Image (tube, grey):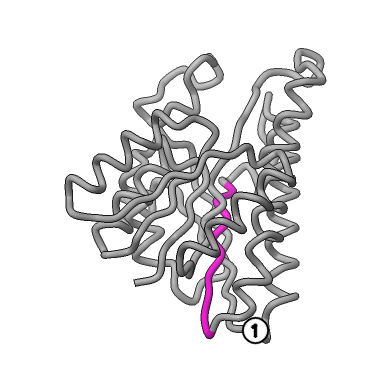
Amino acid sequence: MEAIVITGAGTGLGKQLALKYAKKGHPIILMGRREYPLFAVKQEIEANEGQAFIYTLDIRSYEDVCQVSAQIIQQHKIGCLINNAGIGHFGSLASLTCEQIHEMIETNVCGTIYMTKAFLPYFQTLPKAKIINIISTAGLRGKVNESVYVATKFAVRGFTESLVKELENTPISITAVYMGGMDTPFWEGTDHIQDRSRLLPPEQIAEYIIQNENGQAEMIIESNKLL
């Protein structure tokens, strides 16, 4: 089966997507900045007789993305790219530092664009390929104390919707996933979410994505859909 590239694959939704796609027989390309969490996911996949490969990179660096993606394309047959990596800093706009603002823009927006740009020429040579952008409901509506985070997700939404139109007459499918809050390590180190028990488990969201990915340009996942 064709391999699936997943950014931010060491924890949360990226990890769950990796585990579930691997059980379906896909080799998984695990990507992220830190090797240790990726290695733990790789071990879990291999313990269940799946295949996984680790490539560490910083998606904020276009040079890094180009170099690593070229290695992956040379070494694997890729059929799908899942742009999942993201970061959030929360609080009033006045409380955010310039460093935090740049980190969100460079990771959430530039990283998604860089990864897509790097794999697109290769995908255009294939009879069929797929790009899935994990965006969150922050790309659908404004939220209190999330102004810059929401701005980055609106940007990725616009990027994705434009790609759908740009590639509509090609064999490359584009899917935007807008999911509600998940109970993942994403929220560690912040008090933005007071009660994480009300958040959706990433396992359920990953399963929903896999079951409903085909033929959908847009996927909105909120708690009422998973009850």
Label 1 CA crowd tier, 10 Å (few <14, some 14–19, many 20+): some
What span is colored magenta in the figure? 127-135
Image position, residue 221 (x, y; %): 46, 53
**Residue 161 sits in quarter:** bottom right
* Number of numbered tags placed on the structure image: 1
Quarter-of-image position of residue 185: top left
**Residue at 52% across / 39% down in the picture?**
56
Residue toward you, 172 or 152: 172
Picture layout, residue 199 above or below residue 27: above
The residue sitting at 48% across, 51% down in the picture is: 6
- Name the residue nearer the viewer: 176 or 79: 79
The secondary structure making up most of the magenta span is strand
Q: Which residue in the rendered view is the most extreme toward the left?
A: 48
Q: Is residue 57 magenta?
A: no
Return the x and y of residue 224 as percentages of the image width and height: 38, 50
Task: Give the residue at x 69% y 34%.
Answer: 149
In the rendered image, the quadrant that contains the N terminus is bottom left
Residue 182 vs 81, above or below: the answer is above
Residue depicted at 75% across the width and 75% down the height: 166
Q: Position of residue 190 (x, y in %)?
A: 54, 16
Find numbered disc 1 in the image and state the secondary structure of the residue it sits on. Answer: loop
Left/right placement of residue 189 relative to residue 162 reads: left
Residue 131 colored in magenta in the image: yes
Residue 147 falls left or right of residue 6: right
* Residue designated by label 1: 170
Q: Is residue 127 above or below residue 142?
A: below
Depth check: give the residue in front, 40 or 107. 40
Q: Position of residue 164 (x, y in %)?
A: 67, 72
